[in-house]
Amino acid sequence: MISRDNLRILVTGGGGFLGRAIVQALLTQHETWRISVLDLKPPDHDILTRLEHFFQVDVRSAASVNNAFVDYIPDLVIHTAGIIPARQKRYSTRKEDWEHVRSINVDGTRHILDATLASGCKLFVYTSSCTVVIDDLNHDYYYMDETVPIGLANLHYGKSKGIAESYVLDPRHATERGLVACALRPATIIGPGDTAVMSLIHDLIAKGETSFIVGNGDNIYDFMYIDNAVHAHLLAVENLLTTRTAAGEAFFISNCEPVYFWDVFAYIWAQFGHVPTFRVRIPMGLAWVAALVAEAVTWVTGKPSTLDTGSVADGVRTHFSNNEKARRVLGYEPVVGLTEGVKLACEVSIETYEL
Amino acid sequence: MVSATELAYYATHPTELRSIIQWKTWHNPVHERDEKKESPELKECFRQLGLTSRSFAAVIQELHPELLVPVTLFYLVLRGLDTIEDDMTIAIEEKEPLLRNFHEIIDDERWTYNGNGPHEKDRELLVKFDNITKEFVKIKEPYKVIIRDIAKRMGNGMADYAKNQDLEANGVRTIKDYELYCHYVAGLVGEGLTRLFVEAKLANPALLQRPELMESMGQFLQQTNIIRDIREDHEDKRYFWPKEVWSKYVPKFADLFLPENREKALHCQSEMILIALRRADECLFYMAGVKEQSVFNFVAIPQSMAIATLELCFQNYAMFERNIKITKGSACQLMLESTQNLQVVCDVFRRYARKIHRKNSPRDPSFLEISIACGKIERFIESIFPTQTARTLPRDANGAIARKKKEDEETKWDMIYIMIAVLAVLALISFLMIGAAYLAGARFDLAISALKKGNFFPPKNPQGVASLASQFEGVASSSLAAPNAGHSEL
């Protein structure tokens, strides 16, 4: 049994949106634990000073990852580092883009896990993503649970996260090298300081595109407030330190409040003081054709538009998860409601975007 | 009588008219009362039921025979309590002991009460209450125990409210108080009915282990009525909307009805609807525990009506101006859909959840919460009736697809064999009939010749037949003659 008083925990991607929040929570909730961060860029100064170590490492390089573990053996690793291709890149089909995503999310994960095991550390929490299933934009996933097969995602992000998750949870690591690992698959995370989702939604106001709903508007989606994602990670850590019932398992986590996709957009706009005067539902087929035209225009002019066939598909899909397993095994229960979470995210974002 | 406006309405809403006709034509009660076996007192009970309840009388009378009388009496006992509580002409000194002791009164076969004011519409119920008590003593003891227990708790709850001067003057204060009031007048009814169903072995006993489900059944109905009846209750100076909610929008309750506060009133209405709507998934959960069709109909019809009523009220300012109710056509459609199975009722709930979602406006402070409440209904339905897609089929989906293909192949061959058999039988029958006709001397040659000439229909009179026959006889005989001639030449 590991001594709980001065646990050494390594958080990769500790400078990122989720990683930083996890580091902060660990520092506040477990004052005696020794927290280290491995990332491409150093975290904020106030965090940096409270860390045991900061390793400036590019996870794509096995050598530089191994280097970090030379004189350092963590008790547990939380691997959040990764790249989320944003905006148009999300729907990219270019080979170079895929290679870039793969090298960080797949190779990076392999490097970290291999180095962890080589160091003698056995406990590993992997931040996967719900996109391992839903980045397959040709299908709806209603109330999906962990029995739904992965490996069918075709967008770069979900595909890479799926490959990496399968590597981490590969039973051979457990039987041959004693790895005790679990993977969390958060829904789309929002929160103060999030640059991906909020800014994308906010930008639609300036573009004057808030009056359009693609599809019938009845499609349902899962979001997750950052604090709940952090909470789930800490529960996973707790589980691996104690009962280890989560070993070898993946868990969908969300706010457990699936909601009509377009309503969340409208609510966020309303927080920024914008309510569209009218809203039209554009049939999926028509929107898809329009997107195809927009893509052609983009191709000719080189000026990117919001509309593309990928985002049209994203906008009409029903994707929400069943979090029963996380509830049962980890004791996960959201701590901040979605409405409050969106409000909190917007409050900070108002300052960020409206200046 | 059907009014001109109604005629115009149904002329423009044929689907609703269709529902009315379908309901009237096709609805068969699961069980029917056997009036021959009923005592005069019991007949009187059913008459009172019809007089006091517009919505419940029909569904109660279709209940399983085991529960028909207990539920009817349960309803009338609670109605009796209600008639005493509601009547403001009864002094509190007289009212309180009546309410608190009502569970003992119902065992007194001679008890009647003449103290209601002349304008109380249900005063006859208490004047002739001995009919009910006489029947009450006859029912099985376990049912009596349940009815007495609920009558006792409801009577005491009502007495507490009647004595509460603060409530009289200021109305309900917090959401908690509001739900407690709904508990006394409706949540307890849900509990009593559930215990009766389980006692009769017509519902899953597990329902008693999840008391929040039966509570939600009552709350959902009662809250919906309180929301819809806002105008009427305001005119009667009864205040059920909690101050905790309306004070966010207007300083005085009466201000909700001022034209300049139209938007605020709608926002307040949304929040009230939200509180009710959050219970909807538990109502569906409850209905999943009902085993018998007549009991299912009995619980499902009011629930479907309630969600439709919430949808009607939502974002509808008319609610503050007058009484509104769902149209008869919608009601009939809902009854048709609520007398089938849980899946159909789930479809009703989903349909109305989406209608509410579509009316929802981002300007409304409860906007996202309402959207989440509708999402909760949809999620619950998904949890019991999952939407299957190619990707969510079980892991052996490929095996399943292969099996399906094989089955399809087998079905195809079955179909072919059946077709061959049918054709063979038809051929045999045709052969036998034509053969019989031939043996009986039918002239197929004449018939075929006539057909060749284009006479597809038999002649209408005997002369026609004769002329036709002679016309073709000639041809036939001449053609027959020719080979003969040739033959003779050989």
Image: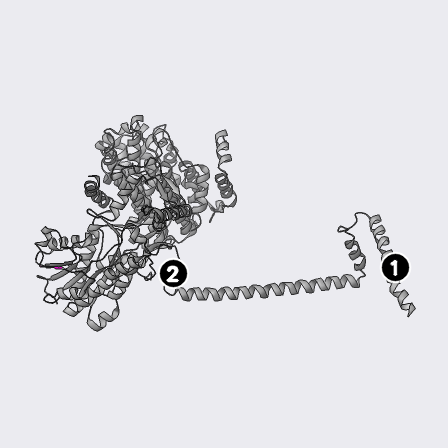
- Disc 1/disc 2 C-alpha distance (Å): 77 Å
The residue identified by callout 2 is: B393
Query: Where is residue B115, by image quadrant?
Result: top left
From this view, report whether residue B312 is shown above or below residue B446. Answer: above
Sooner in the amino-acid sequence: mark 1 or mark 2: 2
* Residue B368 spot, x, y in % from top left: 28, 42
Q: Secondary structure at mark 1?
A: helix
Kind of residue at disc 1: Ser
Task: Name the disc covering residue A207, or none.
Answer: none
Q: Is residue B445 visible?
A: yes
Magenta region? A51-55
From this view, report whether residue B206 is shown above or below residue A66. Answer: above
Quarter of the picture containing the C terminus of chain B is: bottom right
* Residue B466 spot, x, y in % from top left: 85, 51
Q: Is residue B108 visible?
A: no
Query: Where is residue A214, by image quadrant?
Result: top left
The residue identified by callout 1 is: B478
**A54 part of magenta stretch:** yes
Seen at 44% across and 44% down, the residue is B335
Query: Where is residue B56, by image quadrant?
Result: top left
Task: Pick whichever, A42 or A179, lies toward us.
Answer: A42
* Residue B135 spot, x, y in % from top left: 39, 44
Q: Secondary structure at mark 2?
A: loop
